[in-house]
Amino acid sequence: MVRVQPITAEETRPLRLAILRPGQPAAAAVYPGDATPGAIHLGAFEAEQLVGIASFSIEPWPPAESEPCARLRGMATREAFRGSGCGRALFEAGRSWALGVGRVRIWCNARSSAAGFYERLGFERHGEEFEIDGIGPHFSMSIRIR
């Protein structure tokens, strides 16, 4: 059973680099918004091992800028723990945080390879697939939480 708890942005970076930015310099694991007031970084732990991460911040969703939204970034789970419920536990903790700070929607730019995971959580795809330079194909996705 994984335990989810807040961690620092710095604590997310080794997994971000290993899973989301392999082969890139350490600076690639520092995301815009990491230090935004109100942002939260979550870690999923199996025993004492950090096995998954996710970061949430208060950030407008471009198609609906007036709607109070939160952005999910940098969700990653160690390969050996994928399918274990770790990602869902991270999302649910982030969803609780987002509801607590008055958000009605969570959005993300999801890697195309992870779109099915987000759809199983209830996210919807918006628009066409697009490329993020140096990272790969993505979809804009969101879920209404309230």
Image (cartoon, rainbow, N blue to C red):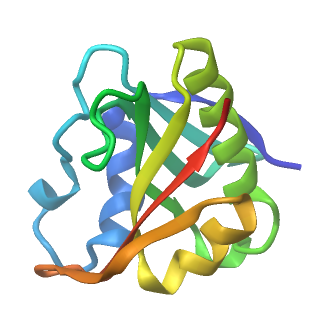
In the image, residue 7 sits, relative to residue 15, either above or below, namely above
Left or right: 23, with 18 as reference point: left
Kindly identify the residue that appears in the image at 67 percent across and 58 percent down.
87
Q: Residue furthest right?
A: 1
Residue 7: x and y in percent read 49, 29
Residue 19 visible (yes or no): no
Q: Is residue 122 visible?
A: yes
Residue 69: where, in percent of width, then height? 42, 32
Is residue 60 toward the left or the right of residue 46 in the image? left
Horizontally, is 71 left or right of 97 in the view?
left
Residue 101: x percent and y percent?
A: 52, 13
Residue 31 point in image, percent of width and height = 20, 47
- Looking at the picture, does residue 37 appear above or below residue 123? above
Count the labels in the image: 0
**Residue at 61%, 66% in the rendered image:** 118
Give the residue drawn at x 78%, y 74%: 83
Identify the image quadrant of residue 32.
top left
